[in-house]
């Protein structure tokens, strides 16, 4: 479903992504982990062109997303993206946040969009907060609304860029719970996260990145019990020490 | 002072109308209102152009803004009145000249305010909107501008009030707005300059202070209705 071939990206002199090739299959849940600055966020942001690439090819459903003439808005409408800092629209209620894109991109009538948005908010346990504004919600609630907002476009793929990193520890669980349920429903997901428990339980595969390269690809079982690359071993040792 | 008002109130209010062109306070108010109505959309457009991702859009507008902002309004009035007809060969009336000047001057200042408002928002707002598949224009209209305009609404109101006061410069090209009329009255009466100009000052004060109070009350009501700004969002939609 998502195919990367020799993707390269530079920030000036800094080589952020080095010859990254990878395939994500339909219904697969892939967790990307690695130390900060390893290129995880950059990688996931290239998948819906929030970042451009300098070399290589990224195809989604066989279509090269960096090809000239591609409709970037149509591309993004079909890819849900969840940010570290939620990025909810503060001037709109939770419900309006979830209706904005479907209504304005004419995906559904206002009535249908409202009904589906309510269904999604109910799905993330926030139907009772539909009329609340983002600043009236806790971080965990905001992130759950953000997930509902992304789902409102009915995307076949969801990308998560450190969705729990900005949350207080006691709110991490509620967001991961929503993500677990999505994975259980067969959603294709790519998640950049430091939540190793989530990775262990939910991921089909784990990609370990360091210095812009994917150094290890493994099932959670293999990754956590006998990581092969020294950097991955170091990464896991540092985590378990905490 | 009562006598002064009794004798000249009509002249003060409408100038020589209906025996001559409409003038006085009515002209001042009409001119201000027209300038506001025209400058607001133009200012929005220029402000959005100021933060455009395209250099070809950004740079010419930046140049225009910098030039106009570095010149006194009085000079822009002269320029529009003497220079423009000489170059284009089209002679415009005083009211039209003043209106064009005010719209240009106002739009440029409004553009800077709009730009500041847009830049005050975190980058994640645009990214959030774009990640849903909204176009740049939709993201601006639906997400960025409603918030940006809300943030800078006090500055917008000050600029609108400044416009009212700026109409008094029409005096210099013989536009019979309320300051010009007051001067005329002063010439006719001759001995009551203090009274005439107190009345003039009070008139401007009531107009400007009234408008800013009105804006303040309006804003407070919006704030009460919701913590943020859905009501302003619809304003932004209309004016774009």
Image (tube, rainbow, N blue to C red):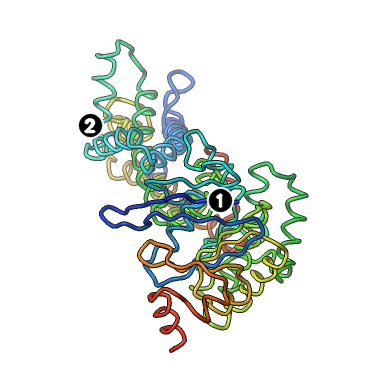
Given the image, what chain letter belongs to the residue carrying mark 2?
Answer: B
> Residue B35 appears at what percent x and percent y?
43, 34
Direction from residue A9 to residue A175 in the image, left or right: right
Q: Quadrant of residue B174?
A: top left
Residue placed under numbered mark 1 in the picture: B232
**Vertical placement of B5 versus A89: above or below?**
above
1 and 2 marks on the same chain: yes
Residue B111 vs residue A237, the one in the foreground: A237
> Residue A234 appears at what percent x and percent y?
39, 80
* Tally of numbered discs: 2
Taking the spot 42% from the left edge, 79% from the top edge, the residue there is A233
Callout 1: few (<14), some (14-19), or many (20+) C-alpha neighbours within 10 Å? some
Residue A81 vs residue B144, the one in the foreground: A81
Which element is circle 1 on? helix
Label 1 and label 2: CA atoms lie apart by 35 Å
Residue placed under numbered mark 2 in the picture: B75
Q: Quadrant of residue B84?
A: top left
């Amino acid at each position: 479903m998502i195919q990367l071939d020799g993707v390269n990206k530079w920030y000036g002199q800094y080589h952020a992504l080095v010859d990254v090739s990878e395939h994500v299959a339909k219904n697969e849940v892939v967790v990307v982990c690695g130390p900060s600055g390893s290129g995880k966020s950059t990688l996931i942001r290239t998948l819906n062109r929030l970042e451009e690439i300098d070399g290589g090819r990224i195809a989604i459903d066989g279509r090269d997303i960096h090809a000239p003439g591609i409709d970037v808005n149509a591309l993004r409408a079909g890819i849900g993206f969840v940010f570290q800092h939620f990025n909810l629209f503060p001037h709109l209620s939770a419900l309006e946040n979830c209706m904005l894109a479907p209504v304005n991109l004419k995906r559904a009538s206002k009535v249908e969009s409202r009904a589906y948005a309510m269904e999604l908010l109910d799905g993330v346990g926030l139907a009772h907060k539909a009329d609340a504004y983002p600043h009236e919600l806790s971080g965990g609630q905001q992130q759950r609304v953000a997930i509902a907002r992304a789902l409102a476009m009915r995307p076949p793929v969801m990308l998560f860029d450190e969705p729990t990193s900005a949350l207080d520890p006691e709110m991490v669980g509620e967001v991961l719970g929503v993500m677990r349920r999505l994975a259980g429903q067969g959603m294709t997901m790519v998640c950049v996260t430091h939540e190793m428990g989530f990775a262990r339980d939910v991921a089909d595969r784990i990609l370990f990145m360091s210095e812009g390269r994917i150094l290890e690809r493994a099932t959670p079982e293999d990754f956590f019990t006998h990581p092969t690359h020294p950097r991955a071993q170091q990464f896991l040792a540092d985590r378990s020490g905490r | 002072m009562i006598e002064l008002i009794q004798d000249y109130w009509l002249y003060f209010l409408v100038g020589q109308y209906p025996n001559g062109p409409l003038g006085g306070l009515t002209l001042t108010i009409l001119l201000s209102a027209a300038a506001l109505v025209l400058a607001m959309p133009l200012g929005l457009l220029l402000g959005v152009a100021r933060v455009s991702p395209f250099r070809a859009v950004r740079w010419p507008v930046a140049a225009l803004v910098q030039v106009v902002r570095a010149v006194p309004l009085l000079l822009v009035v002269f320029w529009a009145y003497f220079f423009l007809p000489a170059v284009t060969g089209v002679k415009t009336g005083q009211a039209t000249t003043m209106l064009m000047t005010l719209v240009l001057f106002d739009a440029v200042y409004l553009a800077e305010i709009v730009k500041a408002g847009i830049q005050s928002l975190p980058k994640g707002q645009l990214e959030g909107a774009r990640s849903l598949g909204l176009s740049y224009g939709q993201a601006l209209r639906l997400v960025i501008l409603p918030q940006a305009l809300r943030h800078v609404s006090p500055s917008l109101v000050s600029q609108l009030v400044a416009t009212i006061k700026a109409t008094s410069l029409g005096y210099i090209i013989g536009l019979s707005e309320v300051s010009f009329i007051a001067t005329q009255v002063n010439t006719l009466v001759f001995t009551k300059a203090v009274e005439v100009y107190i009345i003039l000052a009070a008139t401007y004060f009531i107009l400007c202070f009234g408008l800013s109070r009105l804006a303040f009350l309006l804003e407070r009501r919006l704030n009460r209705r919701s913590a943020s700004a859905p009501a302003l969002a619809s304003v932004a939609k209309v004016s774009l």
